[in-house]
Image (cartoon, helix red, strand yellow):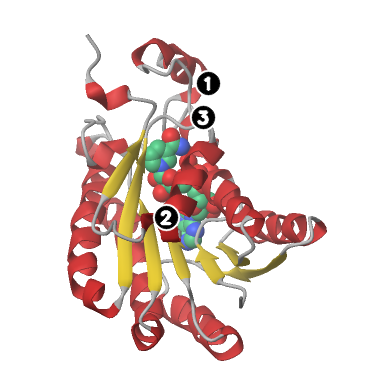
Amino acid sequence: MAKKTVIISGAGIGIGHATALAFAGDGYRVYVTDILEEEGNRVAEEIRAGGGEAVFRRLDVTRSEQADAIVAEIDKNHGGVDVVVANAGIAHRVPLAEMTDAKWDLTHEIDLKGVLRLARAAAPRMRERRSGAIVAVSSISGIAYGWAEHVHYSAAKAGILGLVRGLAAELGPDGIRVNGVAPGFIRTAQSLSEEHSMGEAKLAAQVPAVPLRRIGQPDDVADVILFLASNGARYITGQTILVDGGLTIQQG
Ligand SMILES: NC(=O)c1ccc[n+]([C@@H]2O[C@H](COP(=O)([O-])OP(=O)(O)OC[C@H]3O[C@@H](n4cnc5c(N)ncnc54)[C@H](O)[C@@H]3O)[C@@H](O)[C@H]2O)c1
């Protein structure tokens, strides 16, 4: 069978890195993309060293022309994108009093519109081939969790749920599935940031609130993304799946 191609945004570190390794392990050709060139190149090298196929391309998801160009390269050289993983995201701490239009817009440009840009670029060829899967990374903050001083992030991540449902309805008749994952507390640079997120101590303090009694690892999320892209999820579309160790079920 021909090798499938996945393009992953924000794949230099964290959940995106783990996702790149998961798809490589499943035999995919991986387009590792990020604004972090050193880290992204290292991930592609890591995959190649393990016998997989991967290249790094710089992709700032705020730039439509960059997304279009990389997808055009894949369409030309590999027949089209099989899977899009729209993972890139930022979660800056901004109290309401400091929430400028520019700060709001930047988070939406990356966290929400960045998803649209990759999906929009990949969809035409997916439609022609009548197959494809798109997985976007939302957050518990987009579904069930209020996060003070992160309203722009919460709004953008909630927006992903609507985007996923709308795209699933529009692209489903052409054989394309669109889903999301909503991670809980996952140990990455984002959650470990003292400035913008919880930091090590606060993250550790959340463990008792998690029924599975641990902070998630990036591969806990990557494996669900891989599943949603797989044939095993062939009748699932328009869903955003929580991957939070049970955090949001309100244990009694
Ligand atoms: N870590 C968590 O607890 C958690 C929880 C819920 C949701 N998420 C989401 O998971 C996704 C991955 O986050 P992570 O935790 O691995 O964080 P991370 O900070 O480790 O990774 C984020 C990635 O996005 C990239 N990125 C940022 N701006 C970009 C841009 N303009 N263009 C392209 N790439 C850009 C970064 O370079 C980095 O590679 C994000 O969408 C994040 O919001 C994370």
Numbered tag placed on residue 200 in the rendering: 1
Q: Secondary structure at mark 1?
A: helix
Does the residue tagged 3 have its C-beta within 8 Å of any atom of ligand 1? no
For the residue pair 188 and 212, the one nearer the viewer reads as 212
Question: Does residue 220 lie above or below 108 as drawn?
Answer: above
For the residue pair 55 and 130, the one nearer the viewer reads as 130
To which residue does mark 3 refer?
A: 192
Closest to the camera, between mark 2 and mark 1, is 2
Mark 2 Cα-neighbour bin, 10 Å: few <14, some 14–19, many ≥20: few
Whether the residues at callouts 2 and 1 have beta carbons within 8 Å, the answer is no
Looking at the picture, how far across and down is residue 123, in whole percent?
Answer: 35, 79
Mark 2 / mark 3, whichever is N-terminal? 3
To which residue does mark 2 refer?
A: 232
Q: Amino acid at mark 3?
A: Leu
Q: Secondary structure at mark 3?
A: helix
On screen, residue 51 versus residue 203, left or right, reads right
Question: Does residue 213 lie above or below 137 as drawn?
Answer: above
Mark 1 Cα-neighbour bin, 10 Å: few <14, some 14–19, many ≥20: few
Residue in the image at 76% along x and 60% along y = 45
Q: On the rendered image, what quadrant is the N terminus found in?
A: bottom right
Whether the residues at callouts 2 and 3 have beta carbons within 8 Å, the answer is no
**Residue 244, quarter of the rendered image:** top left
Looking at the picture, how far across and down is residue 135, in whole percent?
Answer: 38, 58
Residue in the image at 55% along x and 82% along y = 74
Closest to the camera, between mark 2 and mark 3, is 2
Mark 3 / mark 1, whichever is N-terminal? 3
Whether the residues at callouts 3 and 1 have beta carbons within 8 Å, the answer is yes
Residue in the image at 25% along x and 46% along y = 152
**Residue 171, quarter of the rendered image:** bottom left
Residue in the image at 33% along x and 77% along y = 120
Looking at the picture, how far across and down is residue 209, in whole percent?
Answer: 34, 14
